[in-house]
Every structure is written in structure tokens, then in C-alpha cells.
Amino acid sequence: MDAVAMAPDQAKAELARFARRPVALLAAGVAVALLLTAGRYGYFGDELYFLAAGRHLAWGYADQPPLVPFLAWATDRLAPGSLVVFRLPAIAATAGGVVVTALLARELGGRRKAQTRAAAAYAICGQFVGSGHYLATSTIDPLLWTLVLWLVVRWVRTRHDPLLVWLGVVTAVALNDKFLVGAFWVVAGLALLAFGPREMLRRPKLWLGALSLVPTLLWQRANGWPRLGMGDAVGAEVDAAGGRESFVPDLLAGAGWVIGALGVLYGVVVPIGSEQLRPYRFLGWTTLGVVAVFLFANGRYYYAAGMFGVLWAAAAVHLEAREPASWWRWVPTWPVFVLSAVFSLPFTLPVWPARFLVDHPEAPRPAYAAEEIGWPDLVSDVAALYRTAPPGTAIVTGGYWQAGALGRPDRADNVLFVGYDPSKAAKYFRDARIVGQVGNRLGVRNGSAHLPVWQLSGRTAGWAEIWPQLKDMKA
């Protein structure tokens, strides 16, 4: 019986049964791991930026729509300064993705084993669990994509049109987190035209989500479409990190080498060639198209990670339906999942004390672990220099992480510039000299350690002229 046709008591009973399944334990395990490490170290630089953006709520920002700045504002208002509370939306989104992936497997015809395997692949995915430690757009986006895909698959199976209203709502939320889901719909639309079911595109309710873009598009238009410049900045960052050649290897590594990567590859092929999953073959082609779009656009590899859930679900359902070889029946699969999770844990979450990172610089750690450390020290060092600066001094930084920790100028005649290269600002002042540097008490090597602080004196132009020349789009 479909959930959409269930009485409330039946739906509650089904949810209760589902909560007792291994899937619920997997989601709870992910949530517990993220909760236990949520207060480790400190804010990540992007989180400081979202906090700063949330203090100036708007319908849009230069590099993303308003959802995450709003969440940052709301959680900080709820418990100011609490890292754990601040990161609760990220924890909920990551654990929720585990559950929705299991629901995807069920919609595709998978029984308990397939649902559990698909959920386990999500639960041990380094890309998702690692980003679940931060409140960021890349943390919320995978859950929203997975929800979109679940609603798409459910509509294909049931043809129950009220689902399209919810599909529009979830798409609207996703568009206000990142614009990436728009690429999914462009590619999925072409795949639906080519392979069906084409009638989905003819349903008016499907297009309701697009209306949610109007406010943020109006904001972008009013501010000169800054999001277009962000695409160039991301492309330059990708080129510096290895270019398009590393896109697919990094994507598969993010899914999790062995289980995650094999599940993604298998899940792409299965809907295309399987009779059982033939109604959903457009999703295999959609995945290939989404990867091609972001690869061609020189986007970050994880932009395509929102497709992981449906691919793991398809792979798990197909494997469950196959008659296994006699030797395979006796091979337990859980140890493989457990070993993968244990192996990836120190690369995914901040399990070590901060002091350990200094004493053991070669120890495995998350990519950005060191960038969570030292922000209070940076603020303290800059504050000490500010107290000795001339009256009428403002603080300007070379990067948005440091700006999130500090601030921006108004009518100041002098500037403390925190960063390596003050040249853009210095040409509007008569004198520039280094007056100190910032660090952190633990001596952790990161992007802010040993940043010089410059004193710029004798402003020669108004801030209305200076400020637009200082701004740039760096990813």
C-alpha cells in the first residue's frame, strides 16, 4: 500500500517499523558521530562567513542564495556561540540523507537488505559525513537532491500528481541553498524527453518550484549579477587544483573508494541496462549528463555528488534481486562496510585533539581540520594591534574567512590590513608598513598563521571609490 493512500494510523505504524530497522541505527550512528565531534576545534572559515552574512539577511548574496545564511542566523540566535547548536542543521541533513537513500531503494523495489546497503553506503561516504561536520551549502545540498530524486522515482512508480507539488517545494528549497539543482533539472528534462516518462514534463505542478527563484534573481539583477563572477572564481580554483583531469577521480574518491565508488559506477549502468529498473533508465543518463555539465563548466567535483544516493539505491536493488554465486552467499558484507567506516573516520571527522595535530603533523585528518583552529587568537592579535592604532582606524582583510572573523570599514582614515598583499588598498593611502602578524597559540599551520598585519595611513580617496576596487570573487 502506498504511503500516500495510508490512513494516519497506518502511516505512523509504518514509520515505527522503519525506525526499528538497521537503517535507523545507521542514521543514528552518523548523527552521534557528528554530534560528538561538532564542538571540536572551532568554526570553519566558511561558517564564519555564513555567520557574517546572516547578520545582514537578504534574498541573495554574491556567491549563494539565502538559505544557509538564514540557518546560521537562526542557530546563532538560538544559542549564541554554540558550535554544536550551530551545526545541528548539518547533522540533521546528513543523517536524513541516510534515511532518504533507504527510501529510494524501497521505491525502486528493494527489500530490507537493499535498503540497508544503500543507506550504509551513504553513512560511510567520506564526502557526506565529512561535510556534515560543517554548516555549509555543500552539506545541505546532497539531502535536497536525494529528496528530489526520491520524489521523482516515487512519481514514476505511482503517477500520483500531488507528489509533484512536494517536488516543487523541495526543488525550491534546494534552489535557495545552491543553484546546482537547476543543472539537474535541465539534464533530467532532456533525459525524460529522450527516454521517458515524458508526461512528467507536461504536469504544471512540476514547475512550481521555479517561482521560488524570483526573489534571489531580482537581488542578483539589482546587484549586477555577482554570481556570474563566482563561476569564474571557482573555475580558477579548479584549474589551480589540477583542472578537469581530477574531476572524476576526486568524485569517486569522495563517494568512497571500493564500496562507494563501485556502487556509483554500478548504479549508473544498472538503470540503463536492467529490465527491472528500465522505467528509471533516464536517471543513469541524467547522472552522466550532470557530470558532463559540471566537468565542462569547470565546477567542483562534489557538485555532482547529489546523484550518489539514487545510484547506491539502484545498485543495491539490482544486487539484491540477482541470484548470487554459491561462494558469495557465504561472504558477509558488513565487515567490509565497518572496515571502510573505521578506515575513513580519521580522514573524515576531527577525532584527534587539536594538540595532536601539532605533535603529529603527518597523522590522517580531514582536509580542513587545521582551518578550524586559531580564530580567537587571530581576533585577539588583531585587537591588540587595533588598540595601538591611530584613532579612526578600520580593519580590512585579504580573505573572506578573516573578514568573517573581523569586519569591514566605514568612514575610517586609516586601515589595519590583514593579509599578504595590501597592494589594492595601499594605492589609496600614503603609507603602508607591517606592524605585526597573527598566529595561534597551538602553532597549527593553517591559512591564517603568520599572516602579516599592515598599517595603511593617510587615506587619499573616499570609501565610495575605494571599496568597489577592493572587492573580488575568490572561491
Image (tube, rainbow, N blue to C red):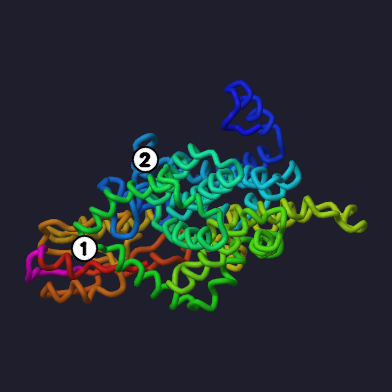
Q: Is residue 409 left or right of residue 72?
A: left
- Residue 68 lies, with reference to residue 243, above or below; the image says above
Q: Position of residue 204 (x, y in %)?
A: 40, 45
Q: Position of residue 53 (x, y in %)?
A: 30, 50
For the residue carrying disc 2, how many other residues have a C-alpha within 10 Å: few (<14), some (14-19), or many (20+)?
A: some
Which mark lies nearer to you, 1 or 2?
1
- Residue that label 1 marks: 224
- Residue that label 2 marks: 76
Q: In the image, which residues are magenta?
A: 455-464
Q: Is residue 267 left or right of residue 52?
A: right
- Residue 239 lies, with reference to residue 100, above or below; the image says below
Residue at 14% from the left image edge and 56% from the top image edge: 410
Is residue 457 shown in magenta? yes
Q: Position of residue 60 (x, y in %)?
A: 28, 52
Nearest the eye: 438 or 183: 183
Q: Is residue 256 left or right of residue 390?
A: right
Residue at 17% from the left image edge and 74% from the top image edge: 426
Q: Position of residue 327 (x, y in %)?
A: 92, 58
